[in-house]
Image (cartoon, rainbow, N blue to C red):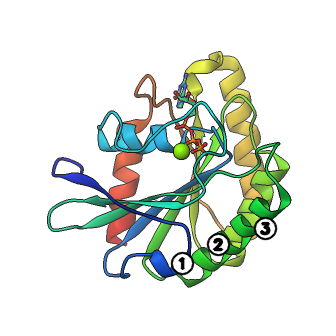
Amino acid sequence: LFAGPISFLRSAPQLRFLPDPDVPEIAFAGRSNVGKSSLLNALTGRKAIARTSVTPGRTQELNYFDVGEPVVLRLVDMPGYGFAKAPPAVVRNWRFLINDFLRGRVVLKRTLLLIDARHGIKPVDGDMMDMLDGAAVSYRIVLTKADKIKATALDAVAERTRTAIRKRPAAHPDISITSSEKGMGIAALRGFVLDSTQS
Ligand code: GTP
Ligand code: MG
């Protein structure tokens, strides 16, 4: 799937800039700095197709990437949420953009919801899960930066996360545990993305 060409298509700050809904899409969502752009790079095996940043909240648009030639899949790097210094107007715009996107995007097959393995699910992630469930968009929880904590702590967070998603109104698949830095869990997640585009 990712062996062919992959290219940046465009940034969509508003829904009217979205590409035509003609191929399946997979979106990457999560708090600012959780590692969305890094995971997109790791999955596609490109070093810097999506811009990563040490400054949280830099990305405020939906960033689109074309996979394949002809295009068979689009990856959507979503703006992060939950950064402390966000002005209320920015948070409001984010909510409207994301809610409308999730509710109206028929080609959106799945969302990967990234959670920092060191922190687990936070209340703002719960809000995001509510938006996803409310829009009937199925999502998979992906723990990120697994290289940053010890195996025992990782097991504990993974178990807590599984317990939390079992309580959700909609059914969700098992979680993924990844490190974009070390390549952990990336091949398995590629398989999941491939399956998602075909169902
Ligand atoms: P926003 O676009 O601001 O919402 O951030 P993002 O979610 O796209 O995060 P990004 O991929 O830019 O990564 C944020 C920081 O975390 C960068 O400094 C990355 O190098 C680092 N990072 C991402 N993934 C990993 C990982 O698996 N392990 C480690 N150790 N660091 C990571
Ligand atoms: Mg990013």
Residue 168 seen anywhere in this rendered image of the structure? no
Q: Which residue is mark 3?
A: 92
Q: Secondary structure at mark 3?
A: helix
Residue 176's place in the image compared with 181, above or below, is below
Q: Amino acid at mark 3?
A: Arg
Q: Earlier in the sequence, mark 1 or mark 3?
A: 1
Image-based side of 68 in relation to 110, left or right: left
15 lies above or below 116: below
Where's ligand 2: which quadrant? top right
If you read the primary sequence from the N terminus, does the residue marked by circle 3 or circle 2 appear first?
A: 3
Residue 199 location, x and y as percent? 37, 72
**Residue nearer the viewer, 146 or 154:** 146
Disc 2 vs disc 1: Cβ atoms closer than 8 Å? yes
CA distance separating discs 2 and 1 = 7 Å
Q: Which mark is residue 15?
A: 1
Q: Quadrant of residue 156?
A: top right
| Residue 64, image x, y percentages | 40, 61
Distance of label 1 from label 3 (alpha carbons): 15 Å
In-image side of 68 versus 46 (left or right): left
Q: Which residue is mark 2?
A: 97
Relative to 144, residue 82 above or below: below
As shown in the figure, which amino acid type bears the numbered disc 2?
Leu
